[in-house]
Amino acid sequence: MFAPEETSAILLSLRVAALAVAVSLPFALLAAHVLARGRFRGKALLDAMIHLPLLMPPVLTGYVLLVLLGRQGAIGRWLDAWFGLSFAFRWTGAVVAAAVMAFPLFVRAIRLSMEAIPREVDEAAAGLGARPWAAFRQVTLPLSLPGIVAGMSLAFAKALGEFGATISFVSNIPGETRTIALAMYTLIERPDGGDGMLRLAAVSLALAFGALLLSEWMVRRSAYRRPPE
């Protein structure tokens, strides 16, 4: 049986990870499509910026979010004054931190799926009179659906285990921002936290492993795959 604080951490982590995936999905689709099909100056720079959270220390990413989205931050002050939105030290900020950290993996999985679709398919759709948005919605999206689901699974797994950016941005508040990763960190520091740590570790591993298996299965079901090199 799980202790109440462990159950709270598990439920919060599931909510945070699911919302992080849902919130970032449209942006990931747009970014992946631009990188997969776009031809423009600065494409390499955009690609680097999207993948930057994977290279930066997570704590630094969380600090940047705090500077930008904190109540006294450049963007956070405006959001709080005009819309009453506050992210720092709240569970909504945990969603933002998880979404930012998972975004590069999300975009990469979708991009690879879209790049595997031959350009002749796009040209055929255009030749039949389909406008770019219609071709994207009726052709590109269905063909890249396995990659999209794979990206969602990877992003969910990454968001589920996010720690550094979360603790820097929203702290470790019981019942508000304490996810599974933060709860395990808390239990490590307790002399009697061993059993709870093992329970949460088992849940975390099971969820992450399941998400990775789903991702791999969807990649293998992709309609178009690059031939082996």
Image (tube, helix red, strand yellow):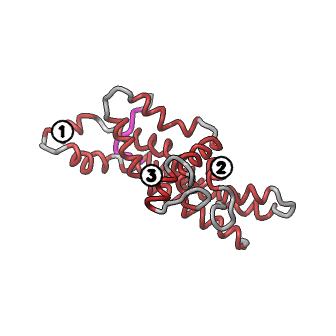
| 225 up-or-down from 73: above or below | above
Could you tell me how far apart the alpha carbons at marks 3 and 2 are, in whole angstroms? 20 Å
**Residue 183 placement: quadrant:** bottom right
Mark 3 = which residue?
24
**Residue 228 colored in magenta in the image:** no
Q: Which disc, if any, is residue 47?
A: none
Q: Position of residue 12 (x, y in %)?
A: 60, 65
Q: What amino acid is found at the position of numbered circle 1 in the picture? A: Ala
User: Measuring 41% from the left and 46% from the top, which residue is drawn there?
Assistant: 28
Give the number of the mark in front: 1 or 3.
3
Q: Is residue 85 left or right of residue 197?
A: left
Residue lying furthest right in this view? 191
- x, y percentage for residue 148? 41, 49
Asked if one can make out residue 109 in the rendered structure from this viewpoint, the answer is yes
Which one is nearer the viewer's eye here, 105 or 30? 30
Crowding near the residue tagged with mark 2, few <14, some 14–19, many ≥20 C-alpha atoms within 10 Å: many
Nearer the observer: mark 3 or 2; the answer is 2
The residue pinned by badge 1 equals 124
- Please state the horizontal and vertical placement of residue 83, each as a whole percent of the image: 44, 61
Q: Nearer the viewer, residue 166 or 195?
A: 166
- CA gap between label 1 and label 3 equals 30 Å
Q: Quadrant of the C terminus?
A: top left
User: Secondary structure under badge 2?
Assistant: helix
Q: Which residue is mark 2?
A: 168
Residue 226 among those drawn in magenta: yes
Q: Which residues are magenta?
A: 221-227
Question: Label 1 neighbourhood size at 10 Å, few (<14), some (14-19), many (20+)?
Answer: few
